[in-house]
Amino acid sequence: MKLIDISHVLDENTPIFPGDCKTALSKYKTIEKDCYNAYVLQSGLHTGTHIDIPMHLINDDKTVKDFPADCFVGKGVLLDVRGEDVIQMKPVYREIVGEQDIVLLFTGFDKYYFQDKYFANHPTASDELAEFLLSKKIKMLGMDMPAPDYPPFTFHKELLRKGIFVLENLTNLQSLIDIADFEVIALPLKINAEASLVRAVCRVNEESIQSALNK
């Protein structure tokens, strides 16, 4: 088995959604002075690669700590939607997306991660695609962009209302092209809050990797 990292680095240079608190990561203990190294992190929970739970946008009492760990692990499905400003529904999705799957939208927009357009001009899901994903009762929707929609976040809210988590700001999804069988692991901190920073990875078996290389 192999793990493919689909997370961005988190540090003081991590881009933030307009209006959010800037991330601060600083070293406050050193081996030379204190006999050990230690850092302190100050960050919003919607910074970098992170996961939203229902409480983020709807009235819900559950925080991240209240969800079992297996809620954040599942069979992955990659939808290659590069070049689509509005991500359209395609017939093949009905064949490859199943209930409780974790669907990843590969837009390629992570290449703009450090540019203003990353937050201002990212792709959005069409109404038809949104309705399909909601009807399939997927477990989670992930993407290599900040969100699947813009304010007032109608699709975002509907996902969360139906208990579908939203995994945002992914990267390296091109590594999953042609890999038919993989598992997404997006474990959050066991935190009493509406979202969490995540180290998201995909677990792939060696046979799937070799099969992709032979295509």
Image (spheres, rainbow, N blue to C red):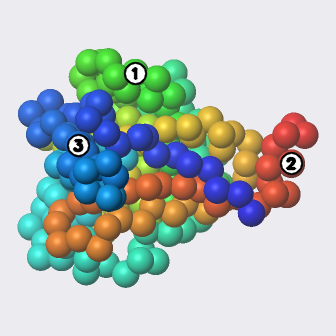
* Mark 3 / mark 2, whichever is N-terminal: 3
Q: Is the residue 87 above or below the residue 137 in the image?
A: above
Residue 4 falls left or right of residue 186? right
Mark nearer the viewer, 1 or 2:
1
Give the residue type at disc 2: Ser
Judge the density around disc 2: few (<14), some (14-19), many (≥20) Cα neighbours within 10 Å: few
As helix, strand or loop, the secondary structure at mark 1 comes to: helix
> Which quadrant: the C terminus?
top right
Q: Could you say where residue 118 lies in the image, as x and y percent from the top left?
A: 32, 24
Q: Is residue 112 left or right of residue 99?
A: left
Looking at the image, can residue 85 be seen? no
Q: In the depicted view, which residue is nearer to us: 186 or 37?
A: 37
View extreme (right): residue: 214
Depth check, front residue: 79 or 144:
144
Q: Which residue is mark 1?
A: 112
The 10 Å Cα crowd at callout 3, few under 14, some 14 to 19, many 20 or more, is: few
Instruction: Locate the N terminus by quadrant.
Output: bottom right
Q: Position of residue 162 (x, y in %)?
A: 29, 67
Residue 211's disc is 2
Eye-nearest disc, 3 or 2: 3
Task: Identify the amino acid type marked 3.
Answer: Ser
**Mark 3 vs mark 2, CA separation in Å:** 44 Å
User: Residue 26, labelled with which disc?
Assistant: 3
The answer to whether marks 3 and 2 mark residues whose Cβ atoms lie closer than 8 Å is: no
User: Which numbered circle lies on residue 23?
Assistant: none
- The residue located at (44%, 55%) in the rendering is 199
Q: Position of residue 166 (x, y in %)?
A: 34, 54
